[in-house]
């Protein structure tokens, strides 16, 4: 059964994210069943890591799935900053100072180490699907992957065998860094003023 849904706060190719009108700390991600490949991958991922008792500050908390004849979805932690919205790494790059970018890259390195340590498989990591929270001084207080998690392979060898997991994570992280450096360079070229 699909729960009562609140305001739409995000849309992707196959998923829509809604506020939970009964709990301001969680949200719902939902797909139509004819376009549910990604959301099923998410549910499989979260179910698996919860069963294995794998916990990471870089992942949102997961509260279970639901479905009816037309839709499938799940409930997860809602990631807000003080202004009531999540700022993605992509958005942050447009406004960050040089020091903030250095702090961001230090935290991205911590994220990478956590993914490898826990063998947390990602499939489409990008600056647009990692969100950050800032304190009143503009310091990063938390970073969370909000999309692009789980294994897209039919037989998830990377999830089952850590050696293959590291190989996949190396490929995915290399792709992520390529995207990150592209946007970082593009935004710097658009705003050549040196930001301190």
Image (cartoon, rainbow, N blue to C red):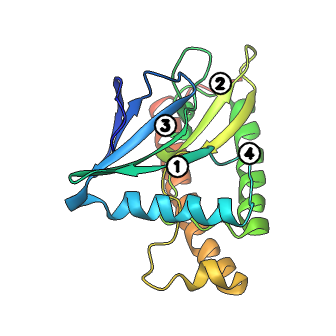
Q: Is residue 28 left or right of residue 168?
A: left
Q: Relative to residue 22, is residue 69 depicted above or below?
A: below
Q: Is residue 23 left or right of residue 60?
A: left
Q: Position of residue 20 (x, y in %)?
A: 44, 27
Bin the neighbour count of mark 4 within 10 Å (Cα to Cα): few under 14, some 14-19, many 20 and up: few
Residue drawn at point x = 61 percent, y = 22 percent:
81
Q: Which mark is residue 64?
A: 1
At mark 3, the secondary structure is: helix
Q: Which residue is mark 3?
A: 187
Q: Quadrant of residue 37?
A: bottom left
Q: Position of residue 62 (x, y in %)?
A: 58, 47
- Decide which of tag 2 and tag 1 comes sooner along the chain: 1
- Decide which of tag 3 and tag 2 comes sooner along the chain: 3
| In front: label 3 or label 1 | 1
| Residue 84 appears anywhere in the view | yes
- Decide which of tag 2 and tag 4 comes sooner along the chain: 4
Q: Quadrant of residue 184?
A: top right
In the picture as drawn, the residue positioned furthest to the front comes out as 1
| In front: label 2 or label 1 | 1
- Decide which of tag 3 and tag 1 comes sooner along the chain: 1
| In front: label 2 or label 4 | 4
Q: Which residue is mark 2?
A: 195
At mark 4, the secondary structure is: loop
Q: Which residue is mark 4?
A: 57
| In front: label 4 or label 1 | 1
Q: Which mark is residue 87?
A: none
Quarter placement of the N terminus = top left
Bin the neighbour count of mark 1 within 10 Å (Cα to Cα): few under 14, some 14-19, many 20 and up: few
């Amino acid at each position: 059964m699909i729960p009562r849904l609140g305001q739409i706060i995000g849309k992707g190719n196959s998923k829509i994210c809604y506020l939970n009108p009964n709990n301001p700390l969680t949200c719902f991600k939902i797909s139509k069943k004819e376009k549910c490949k990604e959301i099923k991958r998410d549910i499989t991922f979260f179910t698996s890591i919860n069963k294995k008792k794998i916990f990471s500050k870089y992942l949102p908390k997961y509260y279970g799935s639901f479905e009816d004849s037309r839709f499938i979805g799940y409930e997860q932690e809602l990631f807000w900053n003080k202004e009531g919205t999540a700022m993605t790494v992509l958005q942050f790059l447009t406004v960050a100072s040089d020091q903030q970018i250095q702090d961001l890259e230090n935290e991205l390195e911590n994220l990478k180490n956590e993914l490898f340590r826990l063998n947390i498989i990602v499939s489409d990591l990008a600056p647009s699907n990692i969100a950050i929270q800032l304190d009143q001084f503009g310091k990063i207080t938390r970073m969370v992957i909000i999309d692009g998690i789980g294994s897209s392979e039919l037989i998830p060898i990377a999830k089952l065998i850590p050696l293959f997991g590291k190989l996949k994570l190396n490929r995915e992280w290399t792709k992520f860094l390529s995207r990150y450096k592209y946007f970082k360079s593009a935004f710097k070229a658009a705003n050549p003023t040196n930001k301190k």
